Amino acid sequence: MISSRSLAANALRLCPSPQSYAQRACFSTIRSAPHLAIRLLDTAVPRPIRSGPRTLTTMSLTAAQKHSMTELPNLSVQRVPCLSDNYVWVLHESGSGKTAVVDPSEAAPVIKALDSRGLKADYILNTHHHFDHTGGNLEMKQHYGATIVGPAADEARIPGIDISLKDGDTWDFGQLQMRVFDTPGHTRGHITLYFPQAEALFPGDTLFALGCGRLFEGTPQQMWTSLSKLTPLPGNTKVFCAHEYTQSNAKFAVAIDQGNKKLQERKRLIDEQRSQGIATVPSLLSEELDTNPFLRPHDSGIRAALGVAPDAPDVEAFAAIRKAKDNF
Ligand SMILES: [Zn+2]
């Protein structure tokens, strides 16, 4: 069973200042029925900040759908599990009624999720070329006539790409603006998608909960530079990464960052969540900064654990952390 202490920690993580009716309901549920609270927490629904065309409300969703939703200002994000451990994200912008799908590894489960909500994919957003992020592109494009948006640096490897974006570009998704960071390292062309108004980040396979992507086509310097573009974003940014790798990442993190109490507490919560099949994504950027070893190469304890000199540059410590994880 998940302890009420862990639930409270998770509640504060997801709803640090309960303002809406639904969020207050979450908190009262924690007190009265803790076993229900963790499901309700994912359904907390702030009121839209702007008016627009009438759109889907969570009232019409099934319980399972509500559990997979994160509601942000003008943006709902639905988690659709695909393949063995991928998360595909369905974005619905309430102002315009537009829908986008981030990294469809396969089409069938995503089309099913969209159909059940009466939505169609207007856009497909790809972070990088790997098949478990683009495998559903062409089928979904044919099914919906979706426009495919992806990294300019790797456009030749993105099936069906229509719009190529690069570092510093912005792209309008309905009433929301999306900002693009080039974040190579995992692959040579990889972009991270950021919605500042909704405080939502889609880093693909660049940043994971308690981890970062393997360096298949890039160098430690490239990946460290990429991650360093994301760390200055607001701590309340929700990190919607593309895989459920958190529990194995946590095992590695505690092995090299043994004095980190926040990490130990987070690992306990993750182990409890995973034992009940509960997703650990999204996380908050602030908790990644506190507990993700790949964002903490400056830490003296991590450096000591890996034999990195106290005065070595951060990228050197980062490379040591990545190498240690590869061999863990
Ligand atoms: Zn990948």
Image: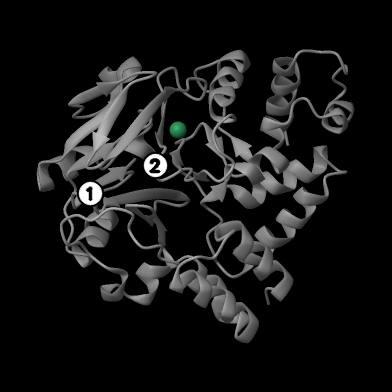
Residue 38 percent coordinates (x, y):
56, 71
Which is nearer the N-term, disc 2 or disc 1? 1
Q: Nearest to the eye among marks 2 and 1: give it.
A: 2
* Mark 2 residue element: loop
Q: Amino acid at mark 1?
A: Thr
Question: Going 74% across and 42% down the picture, which residue do you hit?
Answer: 253
Q: Disc 1 marks which residue?
A: 99
The residue shown at (50%, 65%) is: 19
The image's colour scheme reads one colour
Q: Nearer the viewer, residue 193 or 109?
A: 193
Under circle 1, the secondary element is strand
Quadrant (top left/top right/bottom left/bottom right) for the N terminus = bottom right
Q: Which mark is residue 197?
A: 2
Residue 306's quadrant in the figure?
Answer: top right
Percent position (x, y) of residue 90?
Answer: 31, 51
For residue 117, above or below residue 290: below
Q: Is mark 2 within 8 Å of ligand 1?
A: no
Which residue does the image show at 18% across and 29% down from the upper left? 160
Q: Report whether 89 appears left or right of 261.
A: left
Q: In the image, residue 214 lies at what x, y percent?
A: 57, 29
Q: Is residue 310 above or below residue 322?
A: above
Q: Position of residue 182 (x, y in %)?
A: 43, 20
Q: Relative to 2, does residue 103 appear above or below in the rendering?
A: above
Query: Which quarter of the frame holds ligand 1?
Result: top left
